[in-house]
Amino acid sequence: MTPLAQAAANIRTDRGRSRGKSLLTRMIQHKYIYLLLLPGLLYFLIFRIAPMWGLLLAFKDYNPYAGFFKSEWVGTEHFRDLFESRTFLLMLRNTLAINILGLIFCFPLPIILALMLNEVRHEVFKRINQSIVYLPHFLSWVVVASMTFFILSSDVGIINKVLQSLGYDTIPFMSNPNYFWAIVTAQNIWKESGWGTIIFLAAIAGVDPQRYEAAVIDGASRFRQIWHVTLPAIRPTIIILLILRLGEMVDVGFEQILLIMNPLVMSTAEVFDTYAYVRGILQGQVSAGVAVGMFKGVVGFVLITLANRVVKRLGHEGIY
C-alpha cells in the first residue's frame, strides 16, 4: 500500500472512530431521552422483529410434534398451492373490491369530517360531536356485527320489520351476496371514520393562522379558505396516509368478515384472511396460513414502495 493510500485509510479509520465516539457521547449526554425510547424499541425488537424468523414456516411442512427445526422443508410448495387454488382469483377479487370501496368511500370521509368539525366555532358543541364520532371505534367487531344483524337480518331486522308493516316483502340483506361488500363498507365508515379525523384535525391545527388572515384580506370565502389554504397545508398528511392505505390493499379485517359471513355469501365474502384461518387453524396447516400472511406482506411492501416512488415523481414528499 502506498503512503498516500495508507494515509487515506488512516483518515477513514479516524473518522469512523470519531463518529462512534460522538454517537456514544451524544447517547451519554441525552441518556434520559434514550431511556424513554427504550420501551418502544424493546417492543419492536421483541414483538415485531424477533418473530420474523417464523416466516420460515412458510417454506416448511410444520408438524407440532416434530417441532420447527425437524419439520420437513418443502420450499415454495405452499405458495404454489395458494396460487393454484381454485379460489385464489375469487379471494383476490373480493379482497381488492372491498379495499377499493374502502379507498373510495372510507378514506375521504375522515378528511371531510375533520374539515367540518374544524369549522364549528362553539367549543362545547364541537367537543361533544368529536366524542360522539370517536365512540364507535372503541366498540368491538362483535358488537358491530350484532348491531348489523339487529338492523338488517330477515327475521328480527328493524328495516325488514318496517317493510313488513308497510306491506312489502323482506329483503335478505345478510344472505344475498350482492349486498355483502356494501355492508362491509358501511360498517367501516360508521366505525372508523370518526377515529380517522384525529390525525387530520391535528394537521389542521398546525396550519399557520396568518395564511387564513391573508386569504380573508384577499376576500376569500370560507370554502375558498378550505380549498386554497387548509387542504394544501394538510396535503403531506393525506399523501402519507394514502400511501400506507395502499399497502393494505390485500388485507381485510379478519374478525369483521368472519362475524358476518355465512355459506350463502361465500362468493363475495371469501378473502385471504378467512382462507388463512381455515387452512391454518381449522385444518391445522400452519405453514399454509403463514404462506398467505407472507404473500400479503410482500404485496403490501411492493405497493407501498411503488406508491412512494410515484408520489416522489409527482414532486411530493413520500414516507421515506
Image (spheres, rainbow, N blue to C red):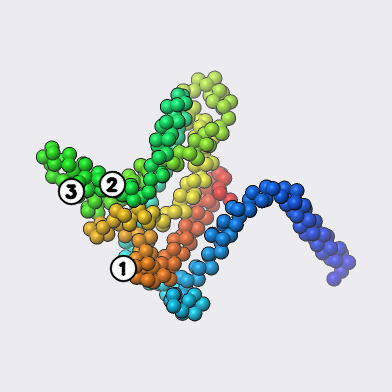
Q: Residue furthest left?
A: 167
Residue at 42%, 65% in the rendered image: 292
**How far apart, in angstroms, are the residues tagged by discs 2 and 3?**
13 Å
Position of residue 282 measured from the top left corner of the image (x, y, whole percent):
34, 67
Compared with 308, 55 (above or below) is below
Location of mark 1 (residue)? 86
Q: Is residue 139 left or right of residue 213?
A: left
Camera-side residue: 70 or 121?
70
Amino acid identity at mark 3: Asp
Location of mark 2 (residue)? 148
Position of residue 26 measured from the top left corner of the image (x, y, whole percent):
75, 50
Residue at 59%, 52% in the rendered image: 40
Q: Is residue 201 left or right of residue 97?
A: right
Dot 3: within a 10 Å radius of its alpha carbon, few (fewer than 14), some, or many (20 or more) residues?
Answer: few
Q: Residue furthest right?
A: 3
Any part of residue 106 in sight = no
Amino acid identity at mark 2: Thr
Compared with 30, 162 (above or below) is above
Q: Is residue 30 left or right of residue 6?
A: left
Dot 1: within a 10 Å radius of its alpha carbon, few (fewer than 14), some, or many (20 or more) residues?
Answer: few
Say whether disc 2 or disc 3 marks the residue closer to the N-terminus: 2
